[in-house]
Image: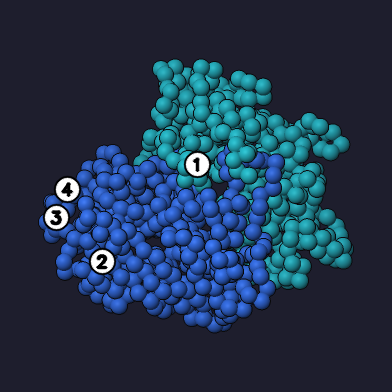
Chain colours: A blue, B cyan
Amino acid sequence: MTTQAAQSEQPLLSVQNLKIRIQMDNGEMKAVDGVDFEIHKGKTLGLVGESGCGKSLTSRAIISINPKECKTSGSIVYRSDNEASLKKMDLLSLNPTGKQIRSIRGRKIAMIFQEPMTAFSPMYTIGNQIMEAIQIHRTKNKKEAKKIALEMLAKVGISDQEKRFDQYPHEFSGGMRQRAMISMALSCNPEILIADEPTTALDVTIQAQVLELMRSLQAELGMAILLVTHDLGIIAQMCDEVAVMYLGKIVEQAPVKEIFYNPKHPYTKGLLKSMPRLGGDKSKRLDSIEGSVPMPINMPPMCGFYERCKDRIEGVCNTQAVPKTRISDQHSVRCFLYSEQREGESQ
Amino acid sequence: MTKPILDVMNMNKDFQVKSKTALFRKPAPVRVLNDISFELIEGETLSIVGESGCGKTTLGRCIVRGMNASSGNVIYHTEDGQKIEFLKLKGKKSKQYRKDIQMIFQDPYSSLSPRMSVFDIISEPLIANFNLKKSEIEEKVTEIAEKTGLNVSYLRRYPHAFSGGQRQRIAIARALITQPRLIVCDEAVSALDVSIQAQIINLLKDLQEQYQITYIFISHDLSIVQNISDRVAVMHLGRIVELASTDSLFSQPKHPYTEALMSAVPQPDPEMKKDRIILEGEVPNPANPPSGCHFHPRCAYRMDKCVQQVPELREVGYNHFTACHFAEELHLRGVQNDAANTN
C-alpha cells in the first residue's frame, strides 16, 4: 500500500517553467510562457484554452516534435515507473532526433492528433502503419507484430480486422481513422497518452464513442492521459485535473470539480459562462468575453487577460507580471485579485 | 404574428456519383435530400441539426439556390403578400427577390476573398443589387459595419488582418447589407472559439430583434441550437426525422435519434457523468441506405416493423412531428430544463 501511495505521489512527468519562443518578423512571440504541470499515473489532465493559447505547442514539446523555429526552454522531467535504466531524465535536454527520445516517443509517451485525415500517410495501409510502431519498439518479428496490431484493432472496436488491416486510410471513415490512430498510439502500451483535440473533427455520436473508448482503455491499461481540448464539456466528462491556458500561461489549475464549481480566474469564469449548455435558460443572453485574444508579441510584463477582464485593477494588472497564487493545496490561479486579497485579509 | 415566409415542399436532391467499377454503367444517384418539407414563420429561428453527411448543408444551399434541387418547390412569401416560386425565378425577378435570402458560411477563413478589402467585400452585394451613388454605398457600409461591431477605420484592410470572430462579423455584415428577410447560417459559429462564439450568437440575436430577420440555423452543436432557436428540425440521412418547438423537442424527444444526439453532448458539468446513450456503429452510407427506417441499425428500440417500413413524418403532439413508428409508445429521455441550476 505504502509503495503505491509513494508511486502515485511521484509524477510520471513534470513540466517546469516551459517556455517556447518563436521569432517572428515583428518581434519575438512568447507562445508558451512559463508553464508548470505534472502528470500522474492513471490520471487525466486536461489542458483547455482557445486557439493560439499554446496548448498544442506545450503538448508537442513533451515529445520534441515542434518545428525548429520554436526555441524551447525549461525542463520536462520524465520518470518511468518500471524501468531502472530510465529513472529520470529531462526530455528537453535530449537531441530531438536522437536515439534516446526516439525510444520514448511512441513507446512510453504516445500521441493522438486532431486530424485523423492528415496524421496517417495516404500511401501505406493502416496495418502497415500500426505495425511500423510495433516493429520499431516491441518486436522485430513481422508475424508477431501483425498479431499485436490485429489485437489492438480489435480492442478499439474495429470489426473485420483482417480486411481493415490491408486497407488504406481513405477507406476508413473519420471515426474509424481516429480509432485506428488510438490503436496505433496504444500498440506499445505507453505510460502517457497525449491526445491533442482527439474528437474535434468528429460528430457528437462518434465523439461519445471515442471518449468512452479512451476511458475504458485507460482503466484497463492504467495510463496517464494529457487531454488537450477547447471543449469544456469534454473536460468535465474526462478529466481529473484541469489546467486553463490563456496566452501561453496557465491561468488556473485545479481538480475538475473545483474548476467547474469554484472557478477563480475571471477568464475561467467567463469561459464557463459563455458556453451555451443543454437545459440552460434560453431567454437569457450568453455572457460573452469582450474583445479577442491579443498576439503575444513584444508583450510587456502584465496580465494577458487585462484588456478583456471585467475585474481588472488599473495600475496593478497592467504593470507587472502576475505571480501564481495558491488558493488551496491543489488549486492555483494567476490573478492579482487573489494575491491581494490574501495579503489584505488575515485569514 | 404567424405569417409564413417560406414553404419548402417535397424537396429532393440527388447527386450523381461516378462509378468506381463499371466503366459505362451509370450508378444510381445518391439521394441526399429526401422529401423535405417544412414551413418557416417570419421572425423565427429554425435550426437544422444532424451529423455530418445528413444533408443539412445541402438543404441550406438548395434553399438559397447555391445548388439546384432535383425536384420540389420553395414558395417565398414576399412582404406584400405575394407567393413566389423561388426556385423558378429568372432574370429580373430573380434579382429582385433573391437578395431577400442571404447566407453565412461556416469557415470565415475561406468564405472571404483575400484579394478584396473588407469594404469591397461588404459593398459587393450592394453594387450588384442596387443602383446607388458612391456616397450612399459608403454610408450604408459604415452603418452596417457599426451594427455588426466592426471598427470602421479598418474597412480598407484585407481579411487576413482580422481574427476569426472579426471575419465572421464581416461575413454577417455582407449578408445583412441587402436587408434580407431570411438568412441561412450554415455552421456560422462552429469555427470560432467559445468566448467568440457567444459574441456572435448574441450579435445574431440582436440583429434578429432589430430587423425581424428569420434564420435558418444549420448546426451540429445542440447546446447552441437550444440556445438560439424557436424550432428545431433533426435530420438523419437526408430526411427530417423530428420537427418541433425547441422546448418540446429538448424536453420530450420523440425520436430515438434525437434522444441519442442529445445524450451524446458532453455537458460542462463533472457531476453529470456517465449514463449516456452511446450509439453503436457509424452513420450509414447514403449511397446504400438501410431498409425501412434509416436509423434502425443504430436504434436501441428497433422492431421488425422498422426494418421493413419507412416511417412517415407525422404529428404526434401539438406541432411536434416525428418519423418513428413507435413515437407514442417510447418514453425517451430529454434534457432537464434546469434554469435554476445554470444561473
- Viewer-side label of 1, 3: 1
Count residues near mark 2 (Cα–Cα under 10 Å), then give few for <14, some for 14-19, many for 20+: some
Residue at the spot x=81%, y=32% of the render?
B1
Q: Secondary structure at mark 1?
A: loop
- Residue B125 sits in which quadrant? bottom right
In space, the residues marked 4 and 1 are separated at their CA atoms by 36 Å
Q: Which residue is mark 3?
A: A142
Disc 1 chain ID: B
Disc 4 chain ID: A
Disc number for residue A79: 2
User: As shown in the figure, which amino acid type bears the numbered disc 4?
Assistant: Lys
Residue at the spot x=19%, y=49% of the render?
A148
- Viewer-side label of 3, 4: 4
Q: Which residue is mark 1?
A: B265
Q: Position of residue B217 (x, y in %)?
A: 64, 43
Q: Are marks 4 and 2 on the same chain?
A: yes
User: As shown in the figure, which amino acid type bears the numbered disc 1?
Assistant: Val
Residue at the spot x=83%, y=55% of the render?
B130
